[in-house]
Image (cartoon, rainbow, N blue to C red):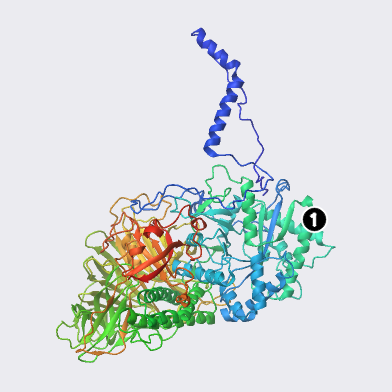
Amino acid sequence: MAFSSRRGGSWAQSTLPSSNPKSKVSRKGRKRTLVKDFIFANFFTIGLLFSLLLFLLILIRFGVPKPITTHFRARSSRIRKPINRKPLLSGTNNNNTLFGSIVDITTKDLYDKIQFLDVDGGAWKQGWSVTYRGNEWDNEKLKVFVVPHSHNDPGWKLTVEEYYDRQSRHILDTIVQTLTKDSRRKFIWEEMSYLERWWRDASDEMKESFINLVKSGQLEIVGGGWVMNDEANSHYFAIIEQVAEGNMWLNDTIGFVPKNSWAIDPFGYSSTMAYLLRRMGFDNMLIQRTHYELKKDLAWHKNLEYIWRQSWDAEETTDIFVHMMPFYSYDIPHTCGPEPAICCQFDFARMQGFVYEQCPWGQYPEETTQENVQERAIKLLDQYRKKSTLYRTNTLLVPLGDDFRYINVEEAEAQFRNYQMLFDYINSNPSLNAEAKFGTLEDYFLTLREEAERINYSSPGEFGSGLVEGFPSLSGDFFTYADRQQDYWSGYYVSRPFFKAVDRVLEQTLRATEMMVALVLGFCRRSHCEKLGTGFSYKLTAARRNLALFQHHDGVTGTAKDHVVMDYGTRMHTSLLDLQIFMSKASEALLGIRYDKLEQSPSQYEPVIVRSKYDAQPLHKVISIREGSYQSVAIFNPLEQTREEVVMVVVDSPDITVVDSNWTCVQSQISPELQYHNSKIFTGRHRAYWEVSVPAMGLGTYYISKGFTECEKARPAKLKIFPKSSSVACPTPYSCVKVEADVAEIENQHQKLTFDVKNGLLQKIISKNSVSGIVNEEIGMYSSTGGAYLFKPNGEAQPFIEEGGQLLISEGPLIQEVYSYPRTAWEKSPISHSTRLYSGEGTVQGFAIEKEYHVELLGHDFNDKELIVRYKTDIDNKKIFYSDLNGFQMSRRETYDKIPLQGNYYPMPALAFIQGPNGQRFSVHSRQSLGVASLKNGWLEIMLDRRLVRDDGRGLGQGVMDNRVMNVVFHITMEASVSPISNLASTPFPYSPSLLSHRVGSHLNYPLHAFISKKSQDMSVKPPPRFFSPLDTPLPCDLHIVNFKVPKPLKFLQQPPEGPRFALILHRRHFDSSYCRKGRTQCTNVADEPVNLFSMFKNLTVSKAKATSLNLLHEDPEVMGFTEQVGGDLSQKGHVAISPMEIQAYKFDLWPQP
């Protein structure tokens, strides 16, 4: 269908009326007649004066308007300041949602209006037949930037090292060799993991050439993260770390800081990424893999370039410019224009003699010569023009590359040589009104912004943005991605869930270690402490990079070959062991146990939880204590508030007593250690529980003793055994009772849970002081034909739990647990589970229900099966639910009948909840990323694991069959609103978690780290009280420390220092204040008032404090999107003021107070 002109129309009609109205002259007096006669006689003069006055008023109010078109150059300012408005948000915001953002487009609106009919568009199969009139470029010529690139996956079908050796090193060599030959040639590079590896091997001459190419603008580093991270499963901590790791290496090595992001291959896009990039100083983004129907709608309305704004942002400080590629893929056939059969003819690496497959459309590229250049150039320009009609400006971006392209000089020369000849023809013919050349992203965005400064491309009534005018503003995210037909990429939300869990364990262990490195270097100014911190630099850097590597969009997604997954897993496992060893030693230093030779000698402590190999389940180390002795347990709290919760260790004897570091008795409980087995339920060991209190970011010490008579021994749990489990022998020293009942119950101070004894599944949650509800737990399976990427169910999931499984209840003063090994059609059930309630009057733990699912989706019986748990509540949620984006913010989700089941599944990195009109809310917190849906009213369904035989045709070449035994842990809360809420269906904004929900999620995702002494001590030797409390006071309950670190520990002792050596990243969480404001826990304050950074740490002086970007490389607030200095009155008074939702970073130094 032909497009109408994009450049505005002619002035079609006058502003004056087409005809004069008839006048009726009054007969009531001469004076009135004279006035009327005067007005009619001087009508034109009066009208002119009135028009002039109106024009002046408009000018004063709106400023000088832009011309419709002009050939004058833009003014020197490249970036316009965002509109500076008074903030609409505050810590005392009583709204359920974060209102504030006004935008032109939301992704919800797009989903509401699009019919998802997949109409065949012809040559552009997912679009339409694109045409143009030919005069669109008469006043503003078409400016084409062809951007050569090579997409290098750090692991996919080969490991990162295999790819480097076989391809990436040669590609980087080729780039340097071919670009230095001709200054007109350009290139972009994204992945620092490969560049850093190449840098270690490159000669000094090659390094110098590379730096010169970057400085000259021929070579641009885009994104500059360690990898091009996934945006569905990655947690925002890991995203910040991976981008910062790459950006800081790049700045230190080459002196370049990226400002343009290039993300062509993640499978869907998160608004969290846009926010983080803006706060890192990025100006522009490019994305590719979004739902083809959304692309079509955006292209039709020329909205493929837009300003991405956070839905909660009232001030437009999060605005970032986005270019969305319009077609199916980022390869050359799908980037020059809408007709891939023609574009493929201009992929000159597909000519005979090269290794790439021939064009599948039957028309092949040919060498450009003087004889054919006119015909070829006109054909290529036709595609450029057609593509240009999908965008507002006459500046066009055309990527030129694919996976692992430009592998040798011959290939690169074929592309550069042929395209340059085509460009020369186009540029030498003014009648074509076009200019084409090689460019970088920076070239493109600079030219586009310059054109947008000169020409007004705004649509009537468009809000747009003060950042770059002429483009619509948009909020929302781009999940779930579909590339064609009904192929929705929701399978990768769950593929390889074992390693998704390891990812988060490494993340929280790295975060805790970063804190301990900073605390050791900040508090312990002894030479041995400094050596411990700085000496760990290489392993700390390796851990940062191994976590960063796994954020790659074929890593944490679970979409790599089996041996590549093994490589990722081994790297993470190695780093986990290194981090735990350091934390063990750091605990000794911070507790004042010893300082000498910490960096050389083994630690006196070892972690309580250990992993024997990269794909093994974590196990609790069994503690064996001889009579008359004790073993110490050091516990580190990585959170910013004091923590009170029940902890557990495994002991080989039930006769134990627990005391704190003052040797005060602590109530304790023992329960038999259970294992998920259909007959051998008890291991013969025991779980010892007690409640600890550990300072914020501090350490506490407890002693487990045997034979300490001054305190009561741990109290044994009482066991209830249900009929099918009657053959189970009662373990010593526990009392057992056999129960005949249809319903089983456990309870604590806050809630009671009821279970159906027949199938061992949860039925109801009965709150003792608020809301109660039906929660019919159901476990089922999909039959599927999908693969690593795609979820393609054959119908709905079918429940498979039968009556008559094992059911056991353990009851004690600190914890009550329901253990269920269900009966199924298979001899060995693919799932068994436990439900736990912990005691605690005002503790976070006491309000949460812990669900642990033990998953063993192993063997041929479960081929092409996908395992789910479903909670069927009585909440009237209208099939609307909320799931998190990267653990940072919530997104509103709605189940649409017009798209298939698999398209209604969404990523769930950490949290999902449903809510009813009465305010009743059911939340499920996860410690690993999974997939979630609400397919029927009141349902919340979460996928746990998947086992697929087939490849799903997206290049991997295998299914997902390497399932591991694993435990999935949820913390569930049921809450009641204390104030009315608006209609769910009419509220487009996402609700925020409650303060309790935020705290439950933090406790689950950032657990206490426990270390046990390797040797027992005699009871007669009692050490002094040992604890470490670094903060002057705990931080407000809505203020979260994302990270506290020493970015460059190896340079910590450098004199004079490069600058501030410590970095602190804070996130102020927004919470739904219609729910209990203090989170029903021991919460003393929230961050309504500024926090004083100068007095945050005990006995330490903070100096050189300054706000910085999230990649720690910018200090100018305007670069990060702010219109004024961030962080409050920081430099003079140390005040840190953060608006809800914002993440802010600070650099400073710490010195012991005199």
Q: In this view, does 141 lie above or below 671?
A: above
Which residue is nearer to you in this view: 429 or 982?
A: 429
Which residue is nearer to you in this view: 101 or 59?
A: 59
Picture quadrant of residue 53 = top right
Asked whether the viewer can see residue 789, the reply is no
Picture quadrant of residue 585 = bottom left
Residue at the outermost left position: 710
Q: Is residue 247 above or below residue 831?
A: above
How many dots with numbers?
A: 1
Residue 851: where, in percent of width, then height?
Answer: 33, 72
For the C terminus, give its image quadrant. bottom left
Residue 195: where, in percent of width, then height?
Answer: 59, 74
Residue 311: where, in percent of width, then height?
Answer: 45, 54
Does residue 531 appear to the left or right of 195 in the view shown? Answer: left
Asked whether the viewer can see residue 482, the reply is yes
Amino acid on which the number 1 mark rests in the picture: Ser
Q: Is residue 502 above or below residue 443?
A: below
Residue at the outermost top position: 30
Q: Dot 1 surroundings within 10 Å: few (below 14), some, or many (20 or more)?
A: few
Residue 465: where, in percent of width, then height?
Answer: 53, 49
Does residue 225 appear to the left or right of 439 in the view shown? Answer: left
Which residue matches tag 1? 428
Question: Mark 1 falls on what kind of element?
Answer: loop
Q: Is residue 232 above or below residue 143?
A: below
